[in-house]
Amino acid sequence: MEWLSYLPALSRGALITAGITLSAIAIGAVAAFAAGIARVEGGRALSLVALCYTELFRGTSLLVQLFWFYYALPLVGISFEPVATGILVLSLHVGAYGSEIVRGALQSVSVQQHEAARALNFGRAQTLLHISLPQALVEMMPAFGNLAIETLKLSSLVSLISIADLTFRAQSIRNLTLDSAGVYSLTLVGYFAMSLVLMLIMRLIERLVRRGAAFPRAAHS
Amino acid sequence: MPFSKIAGLSAIALAAGLSAAGATTLKDVKDQGYIRVATANEVPYSYMKDDGTSAGIGPDVANAVLKKLGVAEANWSVTPFGTLIPGLKAKRFDFVAAEQNISPERCKQVSFTEPNSSYGEGLLVKKGNPKKLTTYADIAKDPSLKVAVVSGANNIDFLRAVGVKDSQVIFITANADALATVQSRADAYAATELTVASLAKGQANVEQVAPFTDPVVNGKPVRNFGGFAFRPEDKELRDAFNAALVEFRKSEDYKKILGTYGLSEASIKAAAERKVEDLCAGK
């Protein structure tokens, strides 16, 4: 069957897609927590910086961001490798969305919890680390699961800055074979399979986080 | 932000800007051991085979010329046709081997070598050519007809020159889109004769318009002259490559490469007869 001959090239692309997606999720999570916590707990200046970052990256098109970092920034002498550009921009983009998830979940921790923490003489950092975050994390997980899968699908845009990901491979094979139906069908299956795996990973993390919240570590016993 | 920090940042930005302004020379490339080249994935001009190696008129000739220059390796990247020149200017690669037509507009942006190939225009239509098209001007005659072109390709200029309205044009991003497009949203796909021929080969639902009359612009039928594009500041590199290319054009190997990809004896001769200066000047 002809479709089988596409598999080696497509799987090479799928590996790149997986690598870029996982890196972007990891770095994006750091950005999301940094910006989200800064919005809630940071002082005025820090909170404003976080707000600017979130709105800038959430409010502009990811494709245009990629093109800007890839084609415009080098004109003033700042240039990153294609893969680094792709991971950086994708991370910042999903990190901006993630920061709103972090902010929302942190703010949903009830006032009484904060009052109780203060009554126990917890500092701000201790309250965040031992009271707010463990509860907020559980709230964040379903939304983060969504965002992780969204990241996988958004990663197809990096094919347009010459990164040989799954979509890029599909376009190349299609260009040679002119078989749009076969190539695109296989590519869809590829993305779906990867998103299933990603979903399972996120469920696993969610379970771990839930267990942690139900039995909080005895921080100050 | 304190002033000292701003000053520090601008100093870094300035230093980075200055380093970016330096030209890439043949020596740089040789020291580095490789040169970065871009193609647009257009069979048969320049494309990547599924094993990741480059092929096509542009890449095959480029590889031969680079070998003569003593450049050991070429790093190929594939990028959409419309981003070839932006990518070159952003230093994503050192030159473009995609047989871009040497046009006055492009000459303002990049520095071309002497022509590497010459080719005419073509039209891809549904099987049986239901609209009886024989040249680009036929599309202009009926405003209800739609024609597809690849975004960033120069065929749009020829279409406009013979009177095709922008409202009749459908932009696509790659040649592979053309097959589905001429069977649905467009009545024809305008591209070069070789592109159309390679798309139509073995297809049951589409065909290449034949006989086809090349569009007449400014009183003479248009021909394309494809060349390699370099950054204007890399003059030394471009000149070295150009000299080796002109030398290579005289060889049998060169004729063999172009022949393999379907270029006629006449087209091969035509390429060597035109000067890049004249093409840039619109002559």
Image: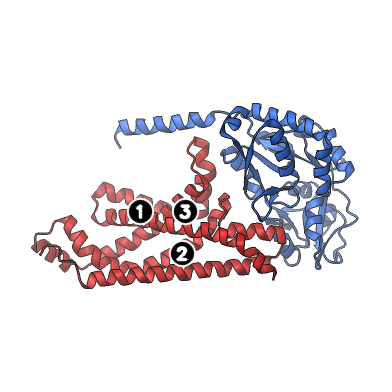
Tell me if B155 is positioned left or right of A32 in this view. Answer: right
In whole angstroms, how far apart are the C-alphas of marks 1 and 2?
A: 16 Å
- Amino acid type of disc 3? Thr
**Which one is earlier in the sequence, the residue at label 2 or at label 3?**
3
Q: Which chain is blue?
A: B
- Amino acid type of disc 2? Glu
Q: Residues within 10 Å of mark 3 (few under 14, many from 20)?
A: few
Q: The residue tagged with tag 1: helix, strand or loop?
A: helix
Tell me if A170 is positioned left or right of B199 in this view. Answer: left
Percent of width and height locating residue B254: 80, 39
In whole angstroms, how far apart are the C-alphas of marks 2 and 3?
A: 16 Å
Q: Identify the residue position indicated by label 2 in the image.
A: A150
Answer yes or no: do the residues labelled 2 and 3 have beta carbons within 8 Å? no
Q: Residues within 10 Å of mark 2 (few under 14, many from 20)?
A: some
Choose between B203 and A95: the one closer to the eye: B203
**Which one is earlier in the sequence, the residue at label 1 or at label 3?**
1
Q: Which mark is residue B209?
A: none
Q: Residues within 10 Å of mark 1 (few under 14, many from 20)?
A: many
Q: Which mark is residue A31?
A: 1
Camera-side mark, 2 or 3: 2
Q: The residue tagged with tag 3: helix, strand or loop?
A: loop
Question: Do we see residue B119 in this rendering?
Answer: no
